[in-house]
Image (cartoon, rainbow, N blue to C red):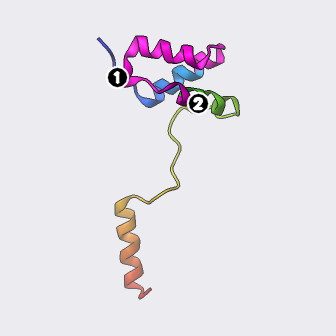
Amino acid sequence: MTQKLKYRDRRAMIRFLGAEGVKPADIHRIILSQYGGVNCMNQRKIFEWIETLKSGRTSVTDEALSGRHHIEHAKALSFEMTDEGV
């Protein structure tokens, strides 16, 4: 039986194994054999996470995105702009 891993848990596992000196290909193999293909990042993504962690990132949680606003926020902004005659 395979368990569903959250992104945070995957990243924590990658952080731990990477700190122990385990190579990305081996980390991929470990996660794949333990949790199955649905829950596993590809080797390239694992390598990128290890490099990100080596460069100083310590958090394994998602960072706030700077892209598009949430739809309700965008609607509110649109309404404010039309009210002001902009």
Tell me residue 63's x, y (percent).
Answer: 53, 43
Compare residues 83 and 43 and report the one nearer the observer.
43
| Mark 2 neighbour class, 10 Å CA radius: few under 14, some 14 to 19, many 20 or more | some
User: Looking at the image, is mark 2 or mark 1 nearer the viewer?
Assistant: 2
Q: Which residues are magenta?
A: 16-45
User: CA gap, disc 2 to disc 1?
Assistant: 20 Å
Q: Mark 2: which amino acid?
A: Trp
* 71 up-or-down from 19: above or below: below
The quarter holding residue 59 reads top right
Determine which residue is flagged by label 2.
Answer: 49
Which residue: 37% across, 70% down?
Answer: 76
Horizontal relation, residue 6 to residue 24: left or right:
left
Tell me residue 83's x, y (percent).
Answer: 37, 84
Which residue: 64% across, 13% down?
Answer: 20
Which numbered marker is on residue 4? 1
Q: Mark 1: which amino acid?
A: Lys
- Residue at the far bottom: name it: 85
Q: Is residue 30 magenta?
A: yes
Q: Quadrant of the N terminus?
A: top left
Which residue: 32% across, 15% down?
Answer: 2
Indicate which disc, 2 or 1, sits on the residue closer to the N terminus. 1
